[in-house]
Image (tube, rainbow, N blue to C red):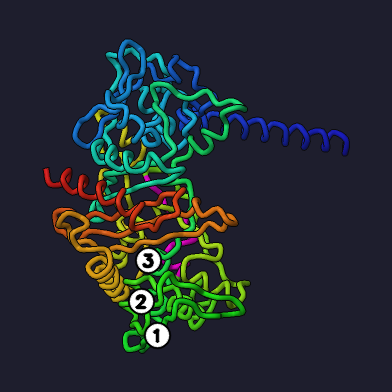
Amino acid sequence: MKRILRRSWFIFIVVIAFLGGMGFLVFETVFNASDWVDQPYNGHISGEGGLSQAGQITDRNGEVLAQTVDKKRVYHSDADVRKALLHVVGDNSLNISTAIQSQYRSQLTGYSFIWGLNMPKSFRSGHDMKLTVDAETCKTAYNGLKNYDSGACVVYNYKTGEILCDVSVKAYDPNSPPKITDENESEYEGVYLDNVLSSTYTPGSIFKIVTAAAAIENIPDIWERTWYCGGKEEIGGGDITCVNAHGTVNLQQAFGKSCNVVFAELAVELGADKMNETAKKMGINARFTVSDVKTKKGHYNVKNANKNQLAWSGVGQYDNEVNPMQMAILCGAIANGGTPVNPYIISGASGSVLKDLGLSETGTKGNELVQGSTARSLGELMRYAVVNDYGDSMFGGLKVCAKTGTGETLTGTDNDKNDGWMIGYCTDEDAPLAFACVVRGTNQYGYSTAGQVVKGAVIQAAKSLRK
């Protein structure tokens, strides 16, 4: 009797497992079948990387960025536009996993659970996709970035969330994807990576925004304080150095002149806990979501740092890392009084694409990154830096608040691998633009590298909004 009972229980468990597995299979097939189609290993389906039936992808002005002609995928006629938007649009190889053609191939091709990729055209709804980016703005940024080893430039409307510029280098022409071999592997290192979303860089002095926020919120007399900078100062057994001896400065002057000594002293005075707390709240260690794609996390943690390392962290060195999109979102938050509008890149589509993706045509509010009063103070510091140190005419009449930085990547004596930055935002009502730009492969400062790239992109983006 006991033997029969054991066998009955065994059969019962097997039946339950079988039914559970069948239920899971049916659920996955009905609700997630399109995910299978999107996988890169299924790129052979229907030819042309599975894109031979895909709809058009256009920019915000209707410029065709990709379309299918005679069952072949054709990209924009301008080679610079093709390269500028490579990491946004993608190519037939599907090697750029974050690109539109890789992420949303099933929607672009009109995949159906019933018909697969063979649905009759008469039954199909439209599967074209319109993006928020402006092709001309992206081309402008690309031409500024293309001679650097690596880099990224992002410009977005911090009121609506629309991304107007999203450019990453290295890049190649999607009309002729490279064949990477052992011999040319180093030449194409990182070429499939969208640096706007998926890379981090040493921030250098743009991180002084975080240190300044911590000081404003935790040091009551911060606006009455002055410091003396003689060009260097010994802190924790090592020198903190400045490019210049700035003399006696207040917080506003120290921020504008990007004084390392002052911000190193502030980090030490604030201590590891306050610095970690502020960096965490401002999203430095967080991931942000942009049209279904998560950004790479930045990094800041000085829990175990010694005094000298803590000092350098306040300057934006030590082992600090930040992501370009993350920094643009932070600037958007400062511009919005502390709370960002989440950026997005898919503007609209015919048929049911937006419904399929579960995406809205408007940006949603994110979490507060900065207190409202702190955001106003940071904006004043960033505006002071532009007016008094960068030159208020730099952005062609736009009223800009910004900060530059030069991150030393600590590669020994190789000074050609610094990360040059400019981040900020415009306060113009008709051009509410937040931006971040970084370049790697320079021994110059962020102002003269990333600053010149983003200047052209922001001016062009403003023109696009004002059309």
Between disc 3 and disc 2, the foreground one is: 2
- Asked whether residue 240 appears in the rendered view, the answer is yes
Quarter of the rendering occupied by the C terminus: top left
Left or right of 192: which side holds 449? left
Task: Inspect the image, locate mark 2, and give the three-letter code of the amino acid beneath it.
Answer: Ala
Task: Inspect the image, locate mark 1, and give the three-letter code of the amino acid beneath it.
Answer: Trp
Local packing at callout 1 (Cα closer than 10 Å; few below 14, some 14-19, many 20+) is: some
Question: Circle 2 sits on which residue?
Answer: 254
Residue 372 in picture, x, y percent from top left: 29, 72
For the point 43% across and 68% down, the residue is: 281
Question: Circle 3 sits on which residue?
Answer: 369
Mark 3 residue element: loop
Looking at the rendering, the stretch of residues picked out in magenta corresponds to 279-290
Which tag, 2 or 1, sits closer to the chain's start?
Answer: 1
Local packing at callout 2 (Cα closer than 10 Å; few below 14, some 14-19, many 20+) is: many
Question: Circle 1 sits on which residue?
Answer: 227
Task: Inspect the image, locate mark 3, and give the three-letter code of the amino acid beneath it.
Answer: Leu
Which tag, 3 or 2, sits closer to the chain's start?
Answer: 2
Q: CA distance from mark 3 to mark 2?
A: 23 Å
Local packing at callout 3 (Cα closer than 10 Å; few below 14, some 14-19, many 20+) is: many
Mark 1 residue element: strand
Most foreground residue, 299 or 344: 299
Residue 450 in picture, x, y percent from top left: 35, 52
For the point 33% across and 83% down, the residue is: 250
Magenta residue check for 283: yes
Magenta residue check for 108: no
